[in-house]
Each structure stands twice: as C-alpha cells, then as structure tokens.
Amino acid sequence: MECAQSSDLRRIESAVNCIKSGGIIAVPTDTVYGIGADPFNVEAVQKLYTVKGRPEEKPIPLVLGSTEDVERVAQNLPGFFYHLIDKFWPGGLTIIVEAKGLLPQLTAGGKTVGLRIPDQPILLRILQEFGGPLAITSANLSGTPAATSPSEFGEELSSRLDYIVDDGKTSGSIPSTVYDISISPPVVHRQGVISDETLEKELICYNRYLKNS
C-alpha cells in the first residue's frame, strides 16, 4: 500500500508543475475549495477568469505561503495590517491592501489586492514549493455555491480544470471574510468565518494602542 506521505508529495509536485506550466488547479483551503493560477502569468490569469466564468471587473485575491510574500505584491501597508496578520493568519481573513507589481487583469484595473495565508497544510506546501503566491478564487462557476469537496464541482467546472488536488471535504463551508483596510475606516466587503464584531473590536483595540503609545 502506498504511504500517505508519498502520495502527498506526488500531488504537491503535480500541482506545482501544473501552476508553473500555466495551468489551473483546484485545491482545498481551510474554508472551501479554490481554483488557482500563477498570478504573474497573464494567460493563466485570463484562463482563471474564463474557467470560473468570473466577470472581469471583479478582482481575484492571492493566497500566500508566508508573510515574506507580502512585500512582493503589496505596498504602503498600514500598521493595522500587521496587527491583523498577527491575530488572524494563517486563517480565514482576506485583507485588502494597496497592490504592487501585479497584472491589471488580476486587480480588475484597480489599485488593491486581497491577501491571506490559509491554514491548510497541503495548500501551504504547494505555495512554498511553488515559491510564491497563488491567484485563487472559490471553486465554483460564478453564481453557484462554493464547493467543499471535488464531488461538488460539477462536470462543467471539473472539465475545465487542469489538475485537482483531492483532499476530501474541507473543514469549513463558509468562505474567508474580506476586509478592506486600504480605505479609512476599514470596510467588510464579504462576511465570512471572522465576524464584523471581531474585526471592529480589533480596530478599537489597535486605535487605543496608538493613542496610548
């Protein structure tokens, strides 16, 4: 019988090779499954929009393998950003900040990008082996529910993917919370696993710290 570790290594290698060749992979996250591509490959990013059926005016966020990736894709980060990542990364918080050096297709022509580090071992290992961030959006056709396992993809989506990392059902069914700190005051654009109330408390806590320091 093949050991699980060997199987994982082969899946990780196959996923990384697929990304590097401009393909679209499906991969589990700590919330729902995502479909992803190399964010610096213009053809791969365009293919990701096509596979998803995602409107081109909607940007695609990035998942990172470590905080070291942040400086490659973001700039002019406020102190509150570092407070948030200390509290919620790895985990289900996507933070919108000012983008740097990204394809205009990825940001839908805007100046910001959503970032997060997921709390999912296989995805983190793929990111670390790939050596950079991944443009990723939930694994579903636009307008349909996000999938928590490959069995929920449907034939149409599955047929459009180049590689599927099947790790069974994800531990959660609610997507990440999307929190925009590129504007003041910050705004929650999508409610997810981290509540508005929790983020509001963190903002109050951080502002109080600034006032007293």
Image (tube, rainbow, N blue to C red):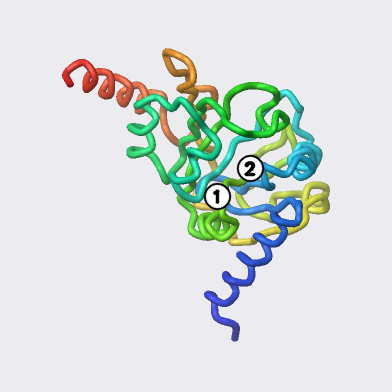
* Residue contact at pointers 2 and 1, CB within 8 angstroms: yes
Q: Which residue is mark 1?
A: 29
Q: CA distance from mark 2 to mark 1?
A: 10 Å
Taking 113 as reference, is 200 above or below it?
Answer: above
Taking 130 as reference, is 4 above or below it?
Answer: below
Residue ID at (51%, 29%): 178
Query: Is residue 102 toward the left or the right of residue 46 in the image?
Result: left
Residue 197: where, in percent of width, then height? 36, 24
Residue 101: where, in percent of width, then height? 61, 33
Residue ID at (28%, 23%): 206
As drawn, the label of residue 136 is: 2
Residue 145: where, in percent of width, then height? 67, 38
Q: Amino acid at mark 2?
A: Ile
Residue 174: where, in percent of width, then height? 53, 39
As drawn, the label of residue 66 is: none
Q: Where does the N terminus fall, quadrant-wise?
A: bottom right
Element at label 2? strand
Q: Where does the C terminus fall, quadrant-wise?
A: top left
Query: Is residue 120 toward the left or the right of residue 20 in the image?
Result: left
Query: Is residue 37 toward the left or the right of residue 67 in the image?
Result: right
